[in-house]
Amino acid sequence: MHQHHSGSKGHHHDHHHDHGHDAHEYDHEQPAARKPVALSKKEKLILRIRHSIRHNSEHGDSYKTMAREAEELSGNEAAQLILSAGEMTAIQNERLEKALRLLEGIDDSDDRP
């Protein structure tokens, strides 16, 4: 678990980094039962990509905060480098979203266990 601190107000948030996990295997049609179902390889991959997009977006937001802090502390160059990292994160998400659209268009009826 990583803690991200932003600003002098003591604000922080915790989030977990778990990049090696399989997608959760639950039937979302019956959330109360939380009955395990077998997901196809494609469905698992789609869930992992969606998770990565959300995760990257969270980091992108924190880069903007860090860039503002860097600007206040040491000037524009450090802030620009941090903003550049945020732009790279946005590019990653654009590519992941395109891959997601392509995968969602693929029939996986032969892929279920």
Image (cartoon, helix red, strand yellow):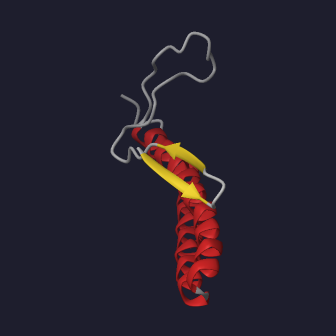
Q: Is residue 29 left or right of residue 112?
A: right
x and y percentages locating residue 97 in the rendered image = 59, 60
Q: Looking at the figure, which quarter contains the N terminus?
A: top left
Query: In the current view of this chain or complex, which residue is farthest to the top?
Result: 33
Against 41, residue 71 (above or below) is below
Q: Is residue 103 visible?
A: no
Q: Quadrant of residue 98?
A: bottom right
Q: Residue at x 54, y 55 (%)?
A: 5
Q: Residue at x 59, y 55 (%)?
A: 58
Against 74, residue 100 (above or below) is above
Q: Say which of 17 and 90 sits in front.
A: 17
Report the number of numbered marks: 0
Query: In the current view of this chain or complex, which residue is farthest to the left?
Result: 20
x and y percentages locating residue 28 in the rendered image = 60, 24
Q: Residue at x 55, y 89 (%)?
A: 77
Q: Residue at x 37, y 37 (%)?
A: 22
Against 5, residue 23 (above or below) is above
Q: Say which of 73 and 108 sits in front.
A: 73
Q: Is residue 41 visible?
A: yes
x and y percentages locating residue 78 in the rendered image = 53, 84
Q: Looking at the figure, which quarter contains the C terminus?
A: top left
